[in-house]
Image: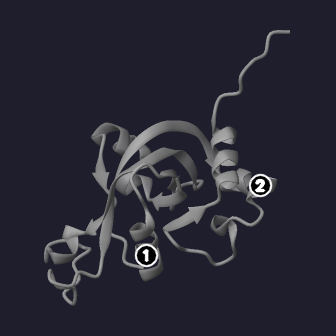
Amino acid sequence: MAYWLMKSEPDVFGYDDLVSNKREGWDGIRNYQARNFLREMRKGDQFIFYHSNATPPGVAGIGKIVGEAEPDPKQFDPSSKYFDPASKPTDPRWDWVTVAPVKKLRYIPLDELRTMPELVDCRLLARGNRLSVMPLTPDEFEAIVAAGSPKRRTAG
């Protein structure tokens, strides 16, 4: 299993929208490196759902890949803001994956993520990084999940 981080603006499509919809195509990726990461995803991979362009930006939940990369239909729709007139059905440029929710996490703001030693080399925190889809190491994924999960009380 691989682990990923996927960004979305919560006013466009947030984690609660994914929970409500149960499954959704992750559309609108128009960066070749991010598209290539989508093409690497396999059913069962998990991802951190990150709210970008939020105040503050941060982690909202966990999702999973339930459908592997296939052509993003919005690239062919002239009424879509994701329309790409240079992309042809016989040779599509852009893909999407189908995702589903796994678990809502305690919201973890970006400033808190920056303090986590497990994330010191995480691409999300790299200066100038604007990719909306990126891989995470298993340790990065687990650290984020642990930080966003309720703390268990031990009997004392």
What amino acid is at disc 1? Asn
| Left or right placement of residue 72 versus residue 61 in this view | left
- Crowd tier of the residue under label 2, counting other residues whose Cα lies within 10 Å: few below 14, some 14–19, many 20 or above: some
- Crowd tier of the residue under label 1, counting other residues whose Cα lies within 10 Å: few below 14, some 14–19, many 20 or above: some
Image quadrant for the C terminus? top right
What amino acid is at disc 2? Glu
89, above or below 27, in the image: below
Residue on which disc 2 sits: 118
Residue found at the very far bottom of the displayed protein: 86
| Left or right placement of residue 88 versus residue 31 in this view | left
Residue 63: horizontal and vertical position, in percent?
A: 45, 46
Q: Mark 2 to mark 1: distance in Å? A: 25 Å
Q: Is residue 27 visible?
A: no
Camera-side mark, 2 or 1: 1
Q: Residue 36 bears which disc, if any?
A: 1
Q: Residue 148 bears which disc, if any?
A: none
Which residue is depicted at the point 53% across and 58% down?
4
Residue 26: horizontal and vertical position, in percent?
A: 34, 60
Mark 1: which secondary structure? helix
| Left or right placement of residue 148 versus residue 96 in this view | right
Q: Are marks 2 and 1 in contact (CB under 8 Å)?
A: no
95, above or below 120, in the image: below
Q: Quadrant of residue 95?
A: bottom left
92, above or below 126, in the image: below
Which residue is depicted at the point 69% across and 72% down?
126
